[in-house]
Amino acid sequence: MADRPDKRRPPTRGRSRPRTGGAGRGASGSATPGTGPAPATPRRRPRLTGRSAVLVLVLAVLAVSYASSMRAYLEQRAHIGDLKAEIAEREAAIDDLSLERKRWDDPAYAEQQARERFGYVMPGETSYVVLDEDGEPLEPEATLSGDTPVDPADEQAWWDRAWSSVETAGDPPRTEDAPAVRVDGTQR
């Protein structure tokens, strides 16, 4: 079957060359000039073939599906991070509450809270209540106010004092004129 000249071989994969029919070829297999038909110019292959179009389409579909999956993955990771932060906050609140519960088991703490919150006193102690100008009791957190606020003395900064001494040195105060009569203590 391969010996019959009228049957064409199926094209092989890889590089394809135009067939010239074998006429005009020498022993080396190249066309000799001036004999036979001129070699055909190779046809330009189209840049986008059907296979490459399908490949590009498949790659685009894969990219879109992976992009949406990646977006969902990143959103879930962010949500997990938020949930872990919330869990840590709640565990800290639970720890604080359990510490507060342990404090209340201590009788000294319960006594201190009763004194501060309710004004309780132990037997034999005297309780004093501070009243304001209207005769109402002051809250423990209240501050007393006077007619004049007590402010710290307005002290001059050291650099202002230093600069004023430089200004004074540049313009010394004038001395009064000397007295007209000089007193001499040596004569009696």
Image (spheres, rainbow, N blue to C red):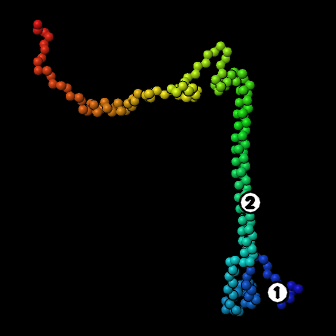
Q: CA distance from mark 2 to mark 1?
A: 51 Å
Residue at (71, 62) in percent of width and height: 67
In the image, which is nearer the foreground, mark 2 or mark 1? 2
Residue 106 at x, y percent in the picture = 72, 23
User: Dividing the image into 4 quarters, which one contains the N terminus?
Assistant: bottom right
Query: Could you tell me the amino acid type at mark 1?
Result: Arg
The image quadrant of residue 123 is top right
SS assignment at label 1:
loop
Q: Amino acid at mark 2?
A: Ser
Viewer can see residue 107: yes
Q: Position of residue 111 (x, y in %)?
A: 68, 22
Q: Position of residue 92 (x, y in %)?
A: 70, 37
**58 vs 105: above or below:** below
Looking at the picture, does residue 37 appear above or below residue 143?
below
Q: Earlier in the sequence, mark 2 or mark 1?
A: 1
Q: For residue 25, what is the image quadrant?
A: bottom right
Q: Please indicate whether residue 33 sits to the left or right of residue 166 in the image.
A: right
Closer to us: 48 or 110: 110
Mark 2 nearby-residue class (10 Å; few <14, some 14–19, many ≥20): few
Q: Quadrant of the C terminus?
A: top left
Position of residue 74 relative to residue 47, above or below, is above
Camera-side residue of 2 and 64: 64
Q: Position of residue 168 (x, y in %)?
A: 27, 31
> Which residue is rendered at x = 73% and y = 36% of the image?
94
Q: Which residue matches tag 1? A: 8
Query: Which residue position is annotated with label 2?
Result: 69
Q: Nearer the viewer, residue 158 or 36?
A: 158
Mark 1 surroundings within 10 Å by alpha-carbon count, few (fewer than 14), some (14 through 19), many (20 or more):
few
User: Which mark, by number, is residue 186?
Assistant: none
